[in-house]
Image (tube, rainbow, N blue to C red):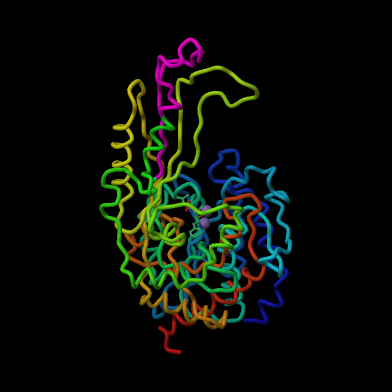
C-alpha cells in the first residue's frame, strides 16, 4: 500500500489539480456547466479508481455522484460523503495566484508545500484523498469493507436537495458508518477528530421606510431612515456581555459540565498565535467563555452582509427606501434551526422602530451534531490516526456546520465520523485557500487504516 501511494504520488497530485481547475461554484448560476462537469469528472475518477455502479444522479438541484465497491454482505459497509462544489472565489484580487489555477507554494505552516486553489481543502482535496486511498486499496487487493461513495454538489449552498436524494435512496445508502473528511485538525501535526458540529439558521432581513429614495435634506429627520433603523435593531441583538437578546434563544442550549469543559480545554491552543494570525489587537465574544468555547460549544449571531443606500463614488445625499442584512446564527446541540428562526423573526419584527416595516426571509438551516466517542467508527478512526501520526487523536468540537450529517442520522440512523485533515489557517472560504501536500498524503495513508480497524471491529 505505502509503495503504491509513493509510486503514484505525482499522479495523485496531478489528478487533484485537474479537479481543482474546474470552477464548481454552486452559489453562482454562471458556473452551472462547470459544476456539472465537475460531477462528471468526479464520477470518472471513481470509475478509474475501481468503483462500480458509478452514477451521476439527478436531483432537483446539482447531481449527487454515487459509486460503490461491495466485497461481501458479511463485511461492514462504510459510506464516504464529500462535496465537489466550492465557495465563490471572490474577492479574486486578493488571491496571490488565480483561484482555479492550482499551484504549490511553501508556507511557514506547510514547509512541504501547500496547494493553493479554491476547494483545495474544502472539500476537493479532502474527498479526493478518499478516492485515491480507495484506488490504492483496490490496486493492492486490500479492501476489507464494502465502500459506498456519495459526493454532492450543493453543500456550500445548504444541501437543500439532499433530503430529497437521501429519502429516495435509503437502501442504496444503507451502511454501518459514514466517514467524512471535511473538517480540520486543532494544530499542525496534531491528529484530530471532530466530535461536534454547530447547527445553522440563516436569515435575510429587509427594512422598508418610505416608498422611494428621498432627498436627505428635504426629508431627513422627519421620516424613519431604514439603514439607521436596521443598524439600531442589529445593535440590540446582543447585550453588553455579548449574549444574544432574543427571548428563548438559550432555552435549549446544552450546558457542558465543568469536566467536559476541562477536557475540551486540553486541546492545544495559543491565544497569542490566534491573534497574530488574524492581526487582531484583541479577541471578543460572550463573557465567561474562552475563545475555543465561543467558537464551538456556544451559539452565536453574526451579520454576514449588510447593504442599502448609496455606496458609490463621492457623496449622494439620500435616504434609502430599503436596507438589508444577511444574518447567521450558529446553533449548539438541542437548538432547533426552525424554532430559532421563528424566535429571531418574532423578536426582530418586535423591535422595529416606528416608521419602518420589516420582512424576515429564512434561508437554509441545519441541525447541530454530536458524535459519541465510544462509537466503533470513532474508535477505528482513533486507531488509524494513532498509527499514521504516532500520537493520539484529540477530540474537538467544531464551530462549522455540515447540515447533511444530522440528516444522515435522521434518515439513515447512522453516525458520521468526522476525520478531517485541514487547518484553520488553510483559509477555507477565504482568498488563498490552500491544503498542505503533506496533509493530503497523510489522509491517503490514514484512510485505509480506518477501514482495516473498522472491519476488524478493533480486534487488533
Ligand atoms: N467543510 C465546511 C464546514 C467545516 C469546516 C466544519 C471546518 C468544520 C471545520 C463546509 O463546507 C461549510 O463551509 N459549511 C457551511 C455550511 C453551510 C453552507 C450550510 C458553513 O459552516 O458555513
Ligand atoms: Mn466543506
Ligand atoms: Mn465550506
Magenta span includes 203 = yes
- Image location (x, y in percent) of residue 321: 45, 20
Residue furthest to the top in view is 218
Taking depth in this image into account, of 22 and 168 the one nearest to the observer is 22
Q: Is residue 93 left or right of residue 356?
A: right
Which of the 4 image quarters holds residue 302?
Answer: top left
User: Is residue 196 rendered to the left or right of residue 53?
Assistant: left
Of 93 and 456, nearer the camera is: 93
The image position of residue 451, as x and y in percent, is: 49, 78
Residue at 66% x, 53% y is 432
Expressed as whole percent of the image width and height from the top left, the position of residue 456 reads 43, 85
The residue drawn where x is 56% and y is 83% is 390
- Does residue 158 lie above or below 185 as drawn? above
Tally the numbered discs: 0
Tell whether position 252 is magenta: no
Instruction: Kindly identify the residue that appears in the image at 27 percent across and 43 percent down.
Output: 247
Magenta residues span 202-229
**How far across and how far down the image is residue 331, in percent?**
37, 53
Quarter placement of the N terminus:
bottom right
Q: Is residue 70 above or below residue 430?
A: below
Lateral position of residue 121 relative to residue 398, left or right:
right
Front one among 358 and 370: 358
Q: Quadrant of residue 208?
A: top left
The residue positioned 65% from the left and 24% from the top of the image is 313
Amino acid at each position: 500500500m505505502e509503495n503504491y501511494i509513493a509510486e503514484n504520488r505525482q499522479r495523485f497530485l496531478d489528478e487533484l489539480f485537474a479537479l481543482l481547475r474546474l470552477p464548481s461554484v454552486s452559489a453562482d448560476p454562471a458556473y452551472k456547466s462547470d459544476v456539472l462537469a465537475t460531477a462528471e469528472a468526479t464520477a470518472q475518477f471513481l470509475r478509474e479508481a475501481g468503483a462500480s455502479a458509478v452514477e451521476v444522479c439527478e436531483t432537483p438541484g446539482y447531481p449527487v455522484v454515487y459509486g460503490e465497491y461491495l466485497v461481501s454482505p458479511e463485511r461492514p459497509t462504510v459510506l464516504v460523503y464529500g462535496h465537489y462544489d466550492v465557495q465563490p472565489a471572490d474577492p479574486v484580487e486578493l488571491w496571490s495566484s488565480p483561484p482555479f489555477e492550482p499551484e504549490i507554494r511553501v508556507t511557514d505552516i506547510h514547509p512541504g508545500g501547500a496547494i493553493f486553489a479554491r476547494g483545495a481543502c474544502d472539500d476537493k482535496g479532502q474527498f479526493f484523498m478518499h478516492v485515491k486511498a480507495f484506488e490504492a486499496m483496490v490496486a493492492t487487493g486490500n479492501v476489507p469493507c464494502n465502500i459506498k461513495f456519495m459526493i454532492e454538489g450543493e453543500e456550500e449552498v445548504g444541501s437543500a436537495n439532499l433530503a430529497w436524494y437521501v429519502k429516495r435512496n435509503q437502501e442504496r445508502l444503507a451502511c454501518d458508518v459514514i466517514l467524512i473528511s471535511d473538517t480540520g485538525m486543532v494544530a499542525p501535526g496534531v491528529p484530530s477528530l471532530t466530535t461536534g458540529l454547530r447547527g445553522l439558521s440563516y436569515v435575510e432581513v429587509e427594512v422598508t421606510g418610505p416608498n422611494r429614495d428621498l432627498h436627505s435634506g428635504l426629508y431627513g429627520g422627519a421620516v424613519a431612515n431604514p439603514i439607521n433603523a436596521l443598524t439600531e435593531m442589529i445593535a440590540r441583538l446582543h447585550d453588553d456581555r455579548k449574549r444574544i437578546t432574543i427571548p428563548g434563544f438559550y432555552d435549549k442550549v446544552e450546558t457542558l459540565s465543568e469536566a467536559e469543559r476541562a477536557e475540551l480545554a486540553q486541546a492545544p491552543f495559543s491565544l497569542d498565535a490566534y491573534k497574530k494570525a488574524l492581526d487582531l489587537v484583541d479577541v471578543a465574544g460572550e463573557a465567561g467563555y474562552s475563545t475555543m468555547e465561543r467558537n464551538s460549544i456556544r451559539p452565536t449571531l453574526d451579520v454576514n452582509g449588510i447593504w442599502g443606500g448609496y455606496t458609490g463614488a463621492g457623496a449622494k445625499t439620500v435616504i434609502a427606501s430599503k436596507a438589508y442584512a444577511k444574518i447567521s446564527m450558529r446553533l449548539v446541540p438541542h437548538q432547533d434551526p426552525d424554532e430559532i428562526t421563528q424566535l429571531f423573526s418574532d423578536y426582530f419584527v418586535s423591535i422595529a422602530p416606528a416608521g419602518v416595516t420589516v420582512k424576515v426571509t429564512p434561508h437554509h438551516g441545519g441541525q447541530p451534531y454530536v458524535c459519541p466517542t465510544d462509537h466503533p467508527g470513532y474508535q477505528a478512526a482513533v486507531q488509524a490516526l494513532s498509527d499514521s501520526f504516532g500520537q493520539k487523536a484529540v477530540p474537538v468540537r467544531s464551530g462549522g456546520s455540515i447540515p447533511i450529517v444530522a440528516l444522515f442520522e435522521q434518515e439513515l440512523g447512522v453516525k458520521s465520523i468526522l476525520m478531517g485533515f485541514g487547518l484553520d489557517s488553510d483559509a477555507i472560504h477565504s482568498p488563498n485557500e490552500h491544503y498542505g501536500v503533506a496533509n493530503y498524503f497523510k489522509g491517503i495513508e490514514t484512510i485505509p487504516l480506518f477501514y482495516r480497524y473498522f472491519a476488524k471491529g478493533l480486534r487488533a
